[in-house]
């Protein structure tokens, strides 16, 4: 049966709602809302296979006067990345005194070849992909696992490769590290984030 999950952002004003079906693999769709660097909404559709590796991710971000879309599809020869854009995100950013954004998509999709997982910035849902794929809930504590992800930056939807390290710390806990950032994640029995210090807290129905 599908599950409905809600996270409240703790770093900025924002939230995320996701509906997931974690039969064989993982299928999810969700919505993020946030106010940094300008108010925006992001909607995504995610599919991971029975092996835990991501098959596809489609993301649409929009705000006042602009919208962007990116679709990532992984095949035998690597990632296919397609984009679309309407309006002018950079104009909206400049009007708010913010620096311009990168272009949507990947400048060289071949750089994503080693990525089996995707990550959407600001979303605690996507940490579950490597956690579940690597079986970290039952893995040897304090043994780090390094992964390459296709990192989708919101709201620009620029896609870049990123190296991330997950270290299991015992039942319900894992340390996440990337580019000098570290956080100790609290996970539920299915490997989904309950608490991500400095980013989000899950709000479960009572």
Image: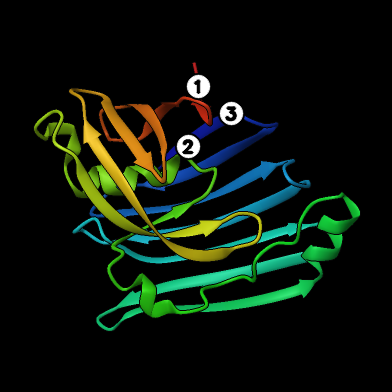
Q: Which of marks 2 and 1 is nearer the N terminus?
A: 2
Say if residue 1 shows up in the picture. Answer: no
Q: In which quarter of the image is residue 191?
A: top left
Write the residue at 11% across / 35% down: 139
Are the residues tagged 1 and 3 within 8 Å (C-beta)?
A: no
Q: In this view, does 202 lie to the left or right of 36?
A: left
Query: Which element is circle 2 on?
Result: strand
Q: Is residue 156 left or right of residue 99?
A: left
Are the residues tagged 2 and 1 within 8 Å (C-beta)?
A: yes
Give the residue number, with chain letter if any, for mark 1. Answer: 205
Q: Residue 8 carries which label?
A: 3
Distance (Cα) linking label 2 and label 1: 9 Å
Distance (Cα) linking label 3 and label 2: 14 Å
Q: Identify whether 185 is placed above or below 151.
A: above
Residue 199 coordinates in the image, percent (x, y): 53, 31
Residue 114 coordinates in the image, percent (x, y): 27, 68
Give the residue number, with chain letter if any, for mark 2. Answer: 4
**Number of labelled discs?**
3
Q: Earlier in the sequence, mark 1 or mark 3?
A: 3
Q: Identify whether 112 is placed above or below 17.
A: below
Query: Which element is circle 3 on?
Result: strand
Label 2 crowding class (10 Å Cα cut-off): few <14, some 14-19, many 20+?
some
Q: Quadrant of residue 156?
A: bottom right
């Amino acid at each position: 049966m599908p599950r409905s999950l809600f996270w409240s952002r703790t770093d900025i004003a924002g939230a995320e709602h996701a509906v997931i079906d974690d039969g064989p693999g993982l299928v999810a769709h969700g919505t993020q809302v946030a106010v940094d660097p300008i108010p925006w909404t992001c909607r995504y559709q995610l599919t991971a296979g029975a092996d835990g590796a991501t098959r596809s991710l489609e993301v649409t971000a929009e705000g006042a006067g602009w919208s962007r879309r990116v679709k990532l599809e992984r095949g035998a020869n690597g990632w296919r990345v397609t984009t679309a854009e309407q309006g002018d995100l950079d104009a909206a950013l400049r009007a708010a005194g913010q620096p311009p954004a990168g272009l949507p998509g990947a400048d060289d999709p071949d750089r994503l070849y080693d990525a089996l997982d995707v990550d959407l910035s600001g979303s605690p849902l996507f940490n579950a992909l490597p956690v579940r794929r690597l079986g970290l809930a039952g893995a040897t504590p304090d043994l780090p696992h390094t992964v390459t992800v296709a990192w989708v930056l919101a709201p620009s939807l620029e896609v870049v490769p990123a190296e991330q390290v997950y270290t299991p710390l015992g039942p319900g806990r894992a340390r996440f590290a990337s580019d000098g950032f570290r956080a100790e994640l609290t996970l539920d029995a299915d490997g989904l984030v309950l608490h991500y210090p400095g980013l989000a807290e899950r709000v479960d129905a009572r």
